[in-house]
Image (tube, coloured by chain):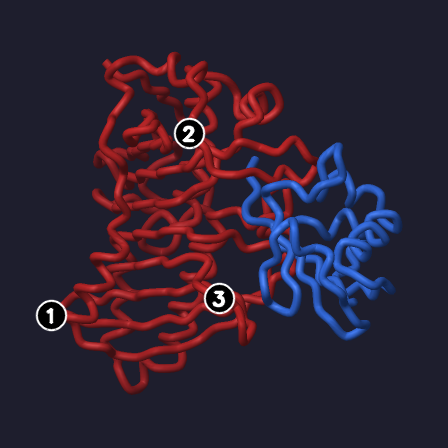
Amino acid sequence: MPRSSSYEVVVDASLFTPAQLQTVAVGRIGFQAGTRWLRDHLCSHRTLVARHGVGLVLWAWQLEYEMPLRFEDADEVVVDVGARVRGPRWSQLEVTMTISGPAGVAARSRAASVPLQLSGDPALSGVSARLPDVLVEHFHEDERERSPFRSQVPALRAAFEREWSELAAHTTPFRVHRHHCEMADQWYWVESTGFAASAREELIIHHAGRAPVLRRALAHGIRRVDATWLRAGQLWDLLEVRTTAYQHGDDIAFVHEVGLAEPDGGSPLAIVVERT
Amino acid sequence: MIVKVRGILLRFTDYENDIQVGCDTVGDGLVKLTDRYPKLRDALMDREGAVRRAHFIALNGEQLTVGELDREVDDDDRVDIITAISGG
């Protein structure tokens, strides 16, 4: 039986939209949950960095909303979290989490991180590596999966471009400030999903007059998020989020490319896909 | 040359991100830069003084190998220090 950690979180009004848990709130709870699983069953994140010289960088994340959960529905939620190593060379750590309220599972997330071998310098720089054997040995047999986690983002984008109708496109600038970062002055991945959510709202503000169906994404909320990170945003980076909205029947999707706002900014740092 | 320092290295340069360094080559400039900001040396270079594997040096947008740090530079040349990834 894969090991899990289960605990209660008292909820406050800041975690919610009028309709559901905020995406960034689920991300923060999920990151905290993964950190808790490591401490409970492997070693603390601090120990992972300080003693083993191993860092973790998020590569892909999925979020699905299931049963309704609004602020008025509960005083607390139950978080259940599990983890396993994945890939033929144990090059991924996958953390799965559910947040449950009175009606059942309200949100379900899956995060795939890539281990880094840290250089040992104060900037915490590192290069991609497999998880060291001394750590892999601590995972039970049913917590090891040889098949790698695969991001849904490339297939989703291809399907939108092939089968969906483009509704609107918009570009929103942001700058990475320190409150968006983790301790190494690199963006905290959750904040990039916040940039995407803000860019969606900017697109709706600017384009809903011509395409009123876009407002559905605000009224009913987002039901699914798929994100992948290719490079990290860093302190004071000037970013732009290039958002494209698509429609297919009653469904609306937003594809956000988060990149550096420079002429030679290169490939995107992250791609976030939100669906109603 | 003008050294562009980004994000995670800014705290090692007292948050200066465009730094003018008088030098003849990229490597010479990096030595002068880290002499001026000793904390940056620990972050950027290993004990032998070589640029750590996690960082890349680019001259006017062209990524340099370790063997190309002897490339000559003028005052207007731009050198970027790019950190591939960092993780906590």
Chain B, colour shown: blue
Earlier sequence position, callout 3 versus callout 2: 2
Q: Determine contact: label 1, label 2, CB under 8 Å.
A: no
For the N terminus of chain A, the quadrant is: top left
Q: Which residue is mark 2?
A: A130
Judge whether A272 appears above or below B51 on screen: below
Q: Which residue is mark 1?
A: A249
Image mark 1: chain:
A
Image mark 2: chain:
A
What residue do we see at 42% from left, 22% from top? A37
SS of the residue under disc 2: loop
What residue do we see at 17% from left, 64% from top? A159
> Which amino acid type is marked by label 3?
Gly
Earlier sequence position, callout 1 versus callout 3: 1
What residue do we see at 38% from left, 54% from top? A17
Could you classify mark 2 by the number of other residues whose Cα lies within 10 Å: few (under 14), some (14-19), or many (20 or more)?
some
Foreground mark, 1 or 2, reads: 2
Judge whether B10 appears above or below A253 on screen: above
Where does residue A181 sit, x and y in percent of width and height?
Answer: 59, 48
Classify residue A49 by image quadrant.
top right
> Which amino acid type is marked by label 2?
Arg
Disc on res. A266: 3
